[in-house]
Image (cartoon, rainbow, N blue to C red):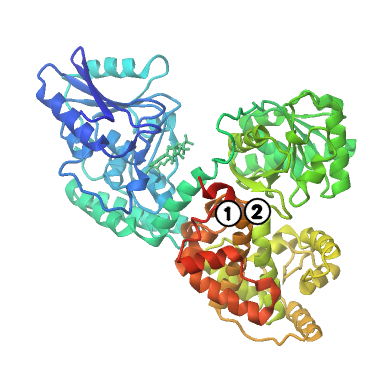
Amino acid sequence: MSEVVRYEVEDGIAVITIDNPPVNALGAGVSEGVVAGADRAAADPAVQAVVLIGAGRSFIAGADIRRFGTKRETPTRRSYDALEASPKPVVAAIHGFALGGGLENALCCTWRIAVPEARIGLPEVLIGIIPGGGGTQRLPRVAGVKAALEMITSGRHVPAPEAKFLGIIDELVETGDLRAAAIAFARSIAGKGLRRVGEIPPPAAEAGLFEAQRKVIARKARGQPAPFAAIAAVEAATRLPLAEGLAEERRLFAELENSPEARALRYAFFAEREVAKLPHLPKDTPTPEIRRVAVVGAGTMGGGIAMSLADAGIPVKLMDASPEGLTRGLQKIRDNYAVSVKRGSLTQAEMDRRLPLIEPVEGYDAIADCDAVIEAVFEQLPAKQEVFRGLDAVMKPGALLFTNTSALDIDQIAAATGRPEAVAGTHFFAPANVMKLFEVVEGAKTAPATLLAAMKLGRAIGKVSAYAGTCDGFVANRSRIPFGLEQNLMVEEGARPEQIDRVMTAFGYPMGPFAVNDLSGLDVNYMTRKRRAAADPNYRKWPVADRLVEMGRKGQKTGAGWYRYEPGDRTPHPDPIVDQIAREVAAELGIEQRSFTDEEILHRLLFASVNEACRILAEGKALRASDIDVMWLNGFGFPRYRGGLMFWADGIGAREIYNQIAAWHQRYGARWAPAPLLREIAEAGGSLREAKAPQLRNG
Ligand code: COA
């Protein structure tokens, strides 16, 4: 047998165990090992039935994603063929995950049993491909076309009880050891005949189903071929005998494997795993447990933070400076949950479980025994420092003190306490209970254990934790600011907001940047800009945006911002007043207005951010370029199928970007000064997405 697959026989039942840590991906030797096991069981007259099971934490998490896009030999026989051809019944015993090739192997077994906590699915579309091991042909044969289509086009992980309901799982193993239960099950069905999924005739689909599904996914799958290819493959299952359907699936799979979207999505998958790692910290750093959390400040942000903790089952004490603020905040939380129940995205029972986890309290003494506090009060340094002084006075030793500031200096906040080692930033993105990005900010004195605990807390509440060093705007917003600046300056130069929005939605953003500004409210960043302008005499102001706010045009909530809105309708309508303000500002500043090509708009916005990302990396404020990509994917709606800012930039090439930035430096002045790291990468012909902070470069 191979090193990653074991074979044992127990009382007439052969047990094939896949042992390829951490998640039993179908890496080198696994498929071969399963084939060898199936052959051995078939040839041994003493074996009556076979069990296929995974060691460790999972059944099989799917194909080894690292092997996609590489040259590899196609084996003469794949595990799917060997399992389905087995002359003896094979029981797939599932715990953890049976995803992609994992579920496809299970579908080639004659029976499938699972523990209730197991999850199954065909998530290939999430990495830009379709199942390539028969999933699109066999799943519709057991679950029906409609359910299979939904699963394959969404990539959803389906809980085992639901999979049983759909007919994919035959039996749930509620108690006891799965291996023992699988052997007992195998013994009970041995000799009772085979029921192969592949022998089920092509399933029928109701009229119009495929067309309807194409419409359902049209918006979300925009720019992505894989979900549409998945529909075509399932359609083939309804028309063709198995062998021909499998050939069609292979053909569609092969077309997608090296598509730009698949390469970008694979990159994003691994970038999101890499971002969790902080290799510059001492290896043996302990990670304190956080079981109970307090949130200080019951405004929009604090309320959203409390909800995201409660959603993950973490008890929260919520406090506010004023009793009215607390009452209002709690009511808002209740209303938010009630809206989700009304929309059907949350059950009443789930709301009733989450709401009591948020306990309103008064005064710091009431939170003193919490393991961590997240401060979310007004974004002004003195207010934050006062809170931290209060926390320092009461919190138990070892409690961790986090601030949700989006730009203030963590060190100045930490200086208000006698325990700066326990202070870090945990920066949520609005709305806090929805957005996935969780930026963990290290201050000069933050202890490694504090950082690791914050990273872990983010993951525990289902967010993507990403490290940032303290600096104005930290990593995510700082890398995004130049985009915002160019977006505004191009309007002065004659580009219209609607053109810029059109370019960016065509690029793949769900909304254009001006429409997003109108949605969030133009007054939000107005104050931050005032603060920056006061601190920096060279700060380039945004006069058009400022004038809109000063006219009372604060976005959707006031019926006008960059666009105008009809009452009760969120559709943005271009407004000539904005063009007029832009013309006035241009005249005052001596800027000549002109027209822009779509490409120039895209490049101006994104190159500006690539340049800043290089500075951030060179300063060691972000650890890896891929971390910045993860932030853009999870914080700003950057299209995932383009990988992220730096991955996309590599598609253009560091040299071309450097040359363009150098030209704009000549034309527009200092703000376009090329970052030295960009220049270095361009001259070396290197890759932007592989750029690392100095503290990681020698590791
Ligand atoms: N191929 C290669 N490596 C994989 C993998 C796969 N299919 N699935 C997981 N891994 C690796 C991860 O990169 C990570 O490696 P690292 O520790 O070196 O960073 C490790 O396994 C653990 O994965 P992680 O995602 O951190 O664990 P988790 O418990 O949070 O999630 C899964 C487990 C299986 C849900 C998740 O890893 C996943 O969705 N995997 C991909 C499944 C998939 O798409 N399969 C179909 C492929 S066609």
Q: Position of residue 428 (x, y in %)?
A: 68, 46
Compared to 261, does 144 lie above or below? Answer: above
Q: Is residue 434 left or right of residue 559?
A: left
Q: Position of residue 221 (x, y in %)?
A: 46, 57
**Amino acid type, residue under disc 2 in the picture:** Val
Compared to 532, does 368 lie above or below? Answer: above
Which picture quadrant has residue 213?
bottom left
Q: Position of residue 514 (x, y in %)?
A: 67, 67
Residue 371 in view here: yes
Q: Residue at x 19, y 21 (%)?
A: 49
Which numbered circle lies on residue 475?
2
Q: Secondary structure at mark 2?
A: loop
Which quarter shows the N terminus?
top left
Residue picked out by circle 1: 628
Between residues 169 and 145, which one lies in front from this camera angle?
A: 169
Which picture quadrant has residue 544?
bottom right
Q: Position of residue 225 (x, y in %)?
A: 39, 60
Task: Classify mark 2: residues with Cα within 10 Å, few (<14), some (14-19) or many (20+).
Answer: many
- Marks 2/1 in contact by CB < 8 Å: the verdict is yes
